[in-house]
Image: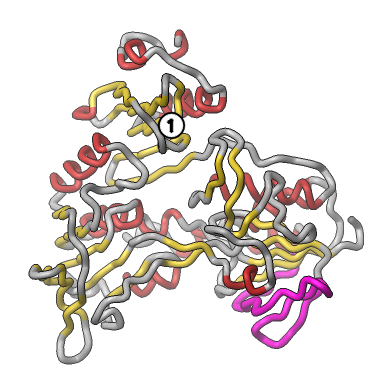
């Protein structure tokens, strides 16, 4: 490995972890990091929370200081986009006209926002939230704004709503589905969060499909239109999901299916190219199907696996996925994937703001949603990996210690 060049495309959580693992596992060759943003890799989850509200400064978002990259002898190329992968010659073509040869390539290119294609979509004041620059644009529009409409009641939408209420804005959330966070949590969790947002003064309206944006004469958004209903606003934030970045690998002939297809070693259909993070579709040993996950945890774990294999140390990605969301003083931690459940068990009292909901399928634990309850989260995560079958009655009884189960 001493003379091999590893190129990492995408300045992300996965990239930072890959650099760390490569050096720890003995790679002494060249490492090049390419990012299309102007910033070193930074922490994305706080963007919709403390960075949006102004509680966190830009410098504190960085995952590692510039010294980290110097210490690990990483060549960093920022503000540069990779335009093509030549797999035959193992070369990358860059947007600035340069070419770069690789021995091993790691794609950590993430995802992009799903866009609304409706009349008025290009009006000023309509924002998406994915990057630091996106949030800077939103913050720039907050001056004098009083009414915010958030389109989408997923993690990003609800976190944005909570941050905006903290700043004193009037907030309306419009969700196309019949309940908030419908793709990731059970109805009980949806209603709990809907109630909390409404108590904080946020209007959460479901079964609302955006048909257009209405604007002023000078081209600024003034309302979100849902059929016959209009919701006046000074600012709009759209959070209706993300799509994996696959244009670059697909154009190079790599297999893609709801993301870049990788195996359990995070290797693509080209043995010299690996991928990690939101951009990938991978086989889950625990859930026995292919998954594409949108989480920091998955990106970091896949990056470790890819780096180990690049170093010639066989490793498999077999990890129980987990996610989190911070809204007001509520920390939601999710372990596992609940798809296919046939029974739920609530442990604790939702009205007290500290509880957990366990998802079972034919008695086996699939997932747990823990609200302000890290013990339930950690225990559930362990049980999911071990395929435990906890007694539902005892699980629901808070007088029964989890350890005895």
Question: In the picture provided, is 354 more to the left or to the right than 293?
Answer: left
Residue 105 seen by the camera: yes
Q: Is residue 384 above or below residue 306?
A: above
Residue 363: quadrant of the picture:
top left
In the rendered image, residue 351, in percent from the top left (x then y), is placed at 19, 29
Magenta span includes 89: yes
Magenta span includes 219: no
**What residue is pinned by disc 1?**
367
Q: Residue furthest left?
A: 228
Q: Nearer the viewer, residue 39 or 381?
A: 381
Question: In the picture provided, is 313 more to the left or to the right than 56?
Answer: right
Question: In the picture provided, is 162 more to the left or to the right than 249?
Answer: left
Q: Is residue 101 above or below residue 196?
A: below
In the rendered image, residue 308, in percent from the top left (x then y), is placed at 76, 46
Give the SS element for disc 1: strand
Q: Is residue 120 above or below residue 193?
A: below
- What residue span does the magenta drawing correspond to? 74-101
Residue 73 seen by the camera: no
Which residue does the image show at 45% across and 37% down from the upper left? 337
Q: Badge 1: how crowded within 10 Å, few (<14), some, or many (20+)?
A: many
């Amino acid at each position: 490995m001493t003379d091999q060049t590893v190129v990492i495309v995408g300045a992300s959580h996965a990239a930072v972890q890959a650099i760390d693992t490569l050096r720890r596992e003995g790679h002494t060759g060249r490492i090049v990091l390419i990012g299309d943003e102007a910033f070193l890799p930074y922490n994305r989850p706080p963007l919709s929370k403390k960075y949006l509200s102004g509680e966190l400064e830009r410098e504190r978002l960085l995952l590692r200081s510039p010294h980290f990259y110097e210490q690990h002898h990483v060549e960093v190329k920022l503000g540069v986009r990779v335009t093509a992968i030549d797999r035959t010659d193992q070369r990358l073509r860059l947007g600035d006209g340069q070419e770069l040869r690789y021995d091993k390539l790691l794609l950590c290119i993430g995802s992009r926002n799903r866009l609304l294609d409706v009349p008025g979509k290009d009006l000023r004041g309509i924002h998406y939230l994915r990057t630091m620059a996106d949030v800077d644009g939103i913050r720039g529009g907050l001056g004098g704004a009083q009414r915010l409409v958030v389109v989408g009641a997923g993690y990003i939408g609800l976190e944005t709503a909570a941050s905006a209420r903290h700043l004193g804005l009037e907030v309306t959330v419009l969700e196309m589905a019949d309940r908030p966070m419908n793709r990731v949590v059970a109805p009980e969790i949806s209603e709990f969060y809907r109630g909390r947002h409404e108590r904080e003064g946020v209007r959460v309206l479901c079964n609302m499909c955006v048909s257009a944006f209405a604007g002023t004469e000078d081209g600024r958004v003034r309302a979100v239109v849902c059929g016959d209903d209009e919701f006046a606003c000074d600012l709009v934030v759209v959070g209706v999901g993300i799509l994996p970045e696959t244009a670059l690998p697909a154009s190079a002939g790599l297999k893609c299916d709801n993301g870049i297809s990788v195996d359990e070693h995070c290797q693509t259909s080209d043995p010299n190219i690996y991928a990690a993070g939101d951009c990938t579709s991978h086989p889950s040993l625990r859930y026995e199907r292919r998954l594409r996950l949108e989480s920091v945890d998955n990106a970091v774990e896949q990056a470790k696996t890819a780096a180990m294999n690049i170093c010639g140390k066989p490793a498999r990605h077999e990890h129980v996925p987990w996610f989190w969301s911070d809204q007001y003083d509520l920390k939601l931690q999710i372990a596992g994937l609940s798809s296919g459940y046939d029974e739920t068990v609530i442990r604790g009292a939702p009205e007290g703001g500290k509880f957990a909901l366990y998802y079972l399928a034919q008695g086996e634990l699939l997932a747990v949603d823990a609200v302000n309850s890290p013990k339930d989260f950690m225990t559930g995560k362990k049980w999911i990996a071990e395929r435990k079958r906890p007694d539902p009655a005892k699980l629901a009884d808070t007088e029964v210690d989890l350890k005895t189960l």
